[in-house]
Image: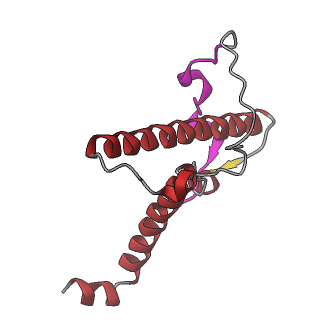
């Protein structure tokens, strides 16, 4: 019955396809993050395997959070400059970008540079969006 509904319902196919694309983008992002040993877990110990997966999830979540904050700040800057921000464009953004990340690069941690609170960094007032129905 599901397959018949899927074949005959264009809207249902479109929604399932869109969600599937998001999941595939996330998995491709995880593959990019988990680059060591081509993403293979070589430990035979279940506890070590679980640790590696949890660490992968932690690192991926941290990168996604930083990407979201960076994109939000860019949107705020554009809005402050008078640009009209279309909600459909913001909805099409993905936090899974990785072109700006240097996996093998130099990382300098400055503990004296304390970032602003997250609530301040990503607050986007609803009036900056031009809504489309």
Name of the residue lying farthest toward the left: 1
Residue 107 left/right relative to 93: right
Q: Is residue 118 magenta?
A: yes
Instruction: Give coordinates of residue 80: x percent, y percent.
Output: 76, 32
Residue closer to the observer: 112 or 2: 112
Residue 6 percent across, percent down from the top left: 31, 84
Report the residue that reaches farthest toward the right. 81
- Front residue of this view, candidates 10 and 133: 10
* Place of residue 124 in the rendered image (x, y in percent of width and height, measured from the top left): 59, 33
Seen in the image, is 64 located left or right of residue 81?
left
The N terminus, quarter of image: bottom left
Residues drawn in magenta:
114-133
Residue at image x 68%, y 21%? 109
Q: Tell me: residue 118, above or below residue 50.
A: above
Query: How many marks can you see?
Result: 0
- Residue 77 rendering spot, x and y as whole percentages: 75, 34
Horizontally, is 118 left or right of 8 in the view?
A: right
* Image-quadrant location for residue 52: top left
Residue drawn at x 69%, y 40% as measured from the top left: 75
- Outermost top residue: 112
Q: Is residue 47 magenta?
A: no
Image height of 116 relative to 8, above or below: above
Q: Quadrant of residue 76?
A: top right
In percent of the image, x 44 and y 62: which residue is there?
23
């Amino acid at each position: 019955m599901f397959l018949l509904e899927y074949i005959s319902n264009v809207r249902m196919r479109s929604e399932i396809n869109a969600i599937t694309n998001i999941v595939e983008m996330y998995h491709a992002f995880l593959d990019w993050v988990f680059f060591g040993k081509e993403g293979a877990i070589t430990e035979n110990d279940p506890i070590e395997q679980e640790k590696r997966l949890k660490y992968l999830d932690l690192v991926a979540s941290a990168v996604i959070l930083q990407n979201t904050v960076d994109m939000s700040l860019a949107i705020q800057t554009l809005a402050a400059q008078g640009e009209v921000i279309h909600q459909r464009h913001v909805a099409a953004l993905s936090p899974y970008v990785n072109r700006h990340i240097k996996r093998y690069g130099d990382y300098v941690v400055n503990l004296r540079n304390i970032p602003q609170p997250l609530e301040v960094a990503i607050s986007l007032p609803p009036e900056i969006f031009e809504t489309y129905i």
